[in-house]
Image: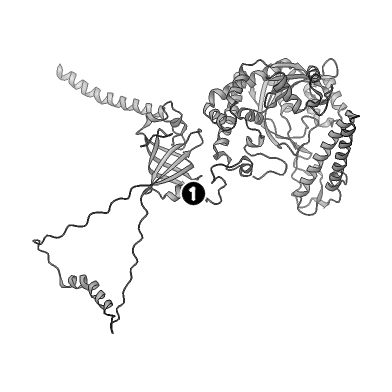
Amino acid sequence: MATEQQHQLQQEQPQHEQQKQEEEAAAMLVAVTTCKYSNRVLLKTILERDDGGVGLVGKRILIGGWVKSSKEETKDPVPPPPPPQAVEKESKVEISCIEIVQSRIPFFRSIINVLGGGNYHVREKLEKPAPRPPPPSIAFLQVSDGSCVATLQVHVASSIAPPCQLLPIGTCILVEGVLMQPSVLRKHVIELKVERILHIGTVEHDKYPLSKKKVPFEMLRDYSQFRPRTTTVASVVRISSALTFATHTFFQNHGFLYVQVPIITTTDCEGFSEKFQVTTLLGKADIKVKPNTRNDNDGVGPEVIKSAVKEKSKVIEELKRSESNKEALTVAVQDFHKTNELASQLEAREKSKPGTSLKADINFSEDFFARQTYLTVSGRLHLESHACALGNVYSVGPRFRADSTKRVAEMSMIDIEMAFSQLEDAMSCADDFFKFLCKWILDNCSEDLKFVSKRINKTCIAHLQSMISTTIEKISYADAVNSFKQVADNKFEKKLEWGDVLTADHLSYLAEEIYNKPVIIYNYPKEVKPFYARLNDDRKTVAAFDMVVPKAGTLISGSQNEERFDMLSSRIKELGLPREQYEWYLDLRRHGTVKHSGFSLGFDHMVLFATGLTDIRDVIPFPRSCGKANN
């Protein structure tokens, strides 16, 4: 009986050991996550542990990344080996005569040299002493793989790879080694001792734009291909990625369907915007091209415009001195700004033209689409077609504007459209969505936010937290105008009257000075909003709104859209829009019309708000603006 129990225990023991090994392997997988498609370990899974990675000491891992900073330390020189012991006299060694003569040759040569040589000509082979090998050293590298803010300290002995290949900033390495605690604990609690190098991507130090540790944002904009390697831009990208994921999470959880709207369209989606034209004809050999003897502005060249700018500037100065007609001064200032902007646009165009300006006589019936097409300004019109069939839909994608030299030409927007909903529903959804994004960043980007608050904006975390807990203020456009009448006259250049456009300064003042929290302004005059916004009963205002956030400006713009065929048709005619562009859009009112509303959120502006940066070009991966499209 005892023998059977012993035999059973002997059979179970290997099973227990195997199970223990499997559990240890499973624990290892939980502790260190490897990329499925490269087998390397993400540094985030090591450095963002509660213990900083100390619990992984002794683990062998494979990591890849780029050198952020480096230094070399020389080891203590190895003492030379002791001289060979003298041969004992008692030992019997047989030495040939040839070996004796060879051993004495240097002695004979020395005597000949001392005596002057006489008639003896001895050719000496002067042998250069062998160069001493460099002393052994260790390269200490701070490596980042882009998965987190922190870097891993990696040390590589010179016997494994030459330090000169590893030390330059930006060098890419793929290495295998063992995690260990450093001998001297400073800011790093764990490091990787490299045992094998699988790849080294060297850097031309003199030509690499990030060779210096600190590079200003202005310079980085010219090297957008390298910007993500900086810690700041890498944090911005991770926050942007988290916001994208949060967007899909919010709308998928609320029953929205994702729809990709077209980038190329035949429709001006707002009715008053400057668009980028799309054509394939300019590169054709048979196109008729003739010298452009006239400018794009009816023969008015840049010099004429500049002269007009000077004249208008003099008029403004005279009106300021007289202080008699404030309305005339306001009109003169607006005219001056428009003329100045036109001068800038013409100057930029002239610089971009190589030599003689040419004008193409284009027959768009021969173009790829056989008609004029543009890059889309907004996705909301096309999104309506799906909302009128599927209910609630949303889209994320690039939108394009060519109406200013001061703003970027391409931005990422989030558009949503909801069937069977009205203005209040859209404003409520916008409020919930904005707060959801703020909370998501706080919950999922804590390390990046800590870095951002340290380097860019100390109050960014507290600001995001306050957005979640605050109640948004909702006021009508009329109430907003009345509130500005109580503000001192010298606060703004122009006294605001009903029907005027609320400028960025006005909106910022509302959110930051008057209410000190997010504000929604609704029921705008119909003249300042897109043609498709639903006309209110007063026939003067439309059901449109803007959400303004302190320190960020307008983040969201939306509206309840006009579902009545006759009203929409009248607005198109009233504004002089080409009706043929909107026949497909009017069809949605002809057949099964429905009340619907939606909004657009400037995604890049949301990233700007979250990070505390001030220039939108620093949060767009590849910013395009007037005269700037490097890649």
Image quadrant in which you'd find residue 429:
top right
The amino acid type found where label 1 is placed reads: Thr
**Percent of width and height locating residue 157:** 37, 46
Residue 231 as seen in the image, left or right of residue 582 = left
Q: Residue 309 lies in what quarter of the image?
A: top right
The residue at which mark 1 appears reads as: 202
Residue 125 against residue 14 in the figure, above or below: below
Q: Position of residue 209 (x, y in %)?
A: 57, 47
User: In this rendering, would 246 be left or right of 299?
Assistant: left
Q: Secondary structure at mark 1?
A: loop
Look at the picture and state if 104 lies above or below 49.
below
Q: Residue at x 50, y 45 (%)?
A: 169
Q: Nearer the viewer, residue 2 or 456?
A: 456
Tell me where residue 456 sits by quadrant: top right
Q: Quadrant of the N terminus?
A: top left
**Residue 399 visible in the current orientation:** yes
* Dot 1 alpha-carbon crowd within 10 angstroms: few under 14, some 14 to 19, many 20 or more: some
